[in-house]
């Protein structure tokens, strides 16, 4: 879970100041795509942490915990941005955060089963 902590710290740091997007990739909704991808990564890391924990989580838990974690962390980030003068709080940013987490939790089982075929035995969860 150290990776999750580091990733959350990175998100907090990114949301603590202005973010500039290069002109070559500016389009309407670029911030929503960024939120979706960033929080999708967080959802994938939470799933991976649970998967590697050695505990046999139910499929429901492996789906719900990352989704709920991402939704709550995204809400806390939007709340944090309310107090940052160069940032704004937007409901649709939070929707993009949650959507990224939802997609990550949905695709992670397939991704990690596929990836498990190429990883050393020490990185594959016991019983898989």
Image (cartoon, helix red, strand yellow):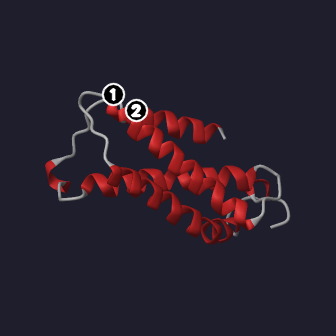
Mark 1 near mark 2, Cβ–Cβ under 8 Å? yes
Name the spot of residue 20 as percent of width and height, x first.
22, 40
Residue at left offset 25%, top offset 56%: 30
Residue at left offset 57%, top offset 68%: 106
Q: Quadrant of the N terminus?
A: top right
Determine whether, in the image, residue 87 is placed left or right of residue 43: left
Element at label 1 = loop
Q: Which mark is residue 83?
A: 1
Residue wearing tag 2: 80
Label 1: how many Cα within 10 Å (few below 14, some 14–19, many 20+): few
Residue at left offset 35%, top offset 29%: 16
Name the spot of residue 66 as percent of width and height, x first.
60, 54
Name the spot of residue 94 as percent of width and height, x first.
40, 51
Q: Quadrant of the C terminus?
A: bottom right
Foreground residue, 120 or 52? 52
Image quadrant assignment for residue 36: bottom left
Foreground residue, 23 or 87? 87
């Amino acid at each position: 879970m150290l990776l999750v902590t580091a990733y959350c710290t990175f998100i907090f740091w990114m949301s603590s100041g202005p973010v500039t997007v290069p002109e070559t990739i500016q389009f309407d909704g670029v911030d929503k795509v960024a939120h979706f991808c960033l929080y999708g990564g967080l959802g994938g890391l939470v799933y991976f942490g649970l998967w590697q924990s050695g505990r046999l989580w139910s499929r429901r838990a492996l789906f719900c915990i990352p989704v709920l974690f991402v939704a709550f962390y995204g809400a806390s980030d939007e709340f944090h941005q309310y107090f940052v003068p160069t940032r704004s709080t937007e409901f649709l940013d939070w929707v993009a955060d949650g959507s990224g987490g939802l997609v990550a939790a949905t695709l992670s089982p397939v991704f990690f089963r596929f990836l498990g075929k190429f990883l050393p035995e020490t990185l594959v969860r016991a019983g898989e």
